[in-house]
Amino acid sequence: GAIVDAMIELGTSTSNVDLAMSSIYSHNRDRIDDETDRAFLVRDDPDHGNAVEKPVQRGPDIGEPPVHPDHEDRGRREIPVDDGVLVEGDDLPTEGQRVWLKGLGCVRLTAEGFEYTGDELDVTREEGVDIVHWVPADRNLPLRLRTMDGDVSGVAEPGVREYDEGEMLQFERVGFARLDSHGEGETVAYCAHP
């Protein structure tokens, strides 16, 4: 595993060498990254501007981000938009500005909410439009993420409910987590790697 990979990286030598834990963590993260499906988690806490609800006007009914960005063969997730989405307040653009809702498309913030613009993905590179994660405002999954710094409350995309307890997920732009339990009121996950 990750320990063997880190030791091989050190090579053979007659001098003393140190096997740094950071090297082991790095190799472990690489292994986990390749195997782990992605999901969206919107953190609903003051450190991230709380969750903010916005209607989406004239946009697709379903967002379809990839299950894993490097493995198209794993398919796409289907996330319903319904009447609106939740984003982290810190990701909310100023009125008149655009963001790219990952797997859905480009939207502009107006006084009424998010207006779908139909812009191509190029705007993220060429015009600096930020890419942000989101969840449906209605059909989402309350989730408590347990971290070393304390619990973080949020809402995840509804498909997280389909994963078994003990499975790993990467909450995009948040970190890796192991699902602990699916309760009536919320799902609990433990942060594994940021």
Image (cartoon, rainbow, N blue to C red):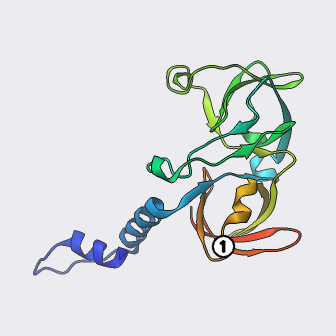
Q: Quadrant of the image for the C terminus?
A: bottom right
Q: Which amino acid does label 1 sit on?
A: Asp
Q: In this view, does 25 lie to the left or right of 100?
A: left
**Front-lying residue, 75 or 50:** 75
Q: Position of residue 149 (x, y in %)?
A: 69, 69
Identify which residue is drawn at 83% across, 68% down: 186
Near-viewer residue (180 or 14):
180
Residue 42 versus residue 109 in the image, above or below: below
On screen, residue 28 versus residue 96, left or right, reads left
Q: With 67 as the anchor, is 61 left or right in this view?
A: right
Percent of width and height locating residue 127: 55, 20
Residue holding disc 1 = 164
Residue at coordinates 80% horizontally, 59% vertically from top-left?
Answer: 141
When the figure is inspected, residue 144 is found, relative to residue 173, above or below; the finding is: below
Across the whole image, how many numbered discs are drawn on residues? Answer: 1
Q: In percent of the image, x 79 and y 41: which residue is there?
A: 89
Q: Which of 3/185 is in front? A: 185
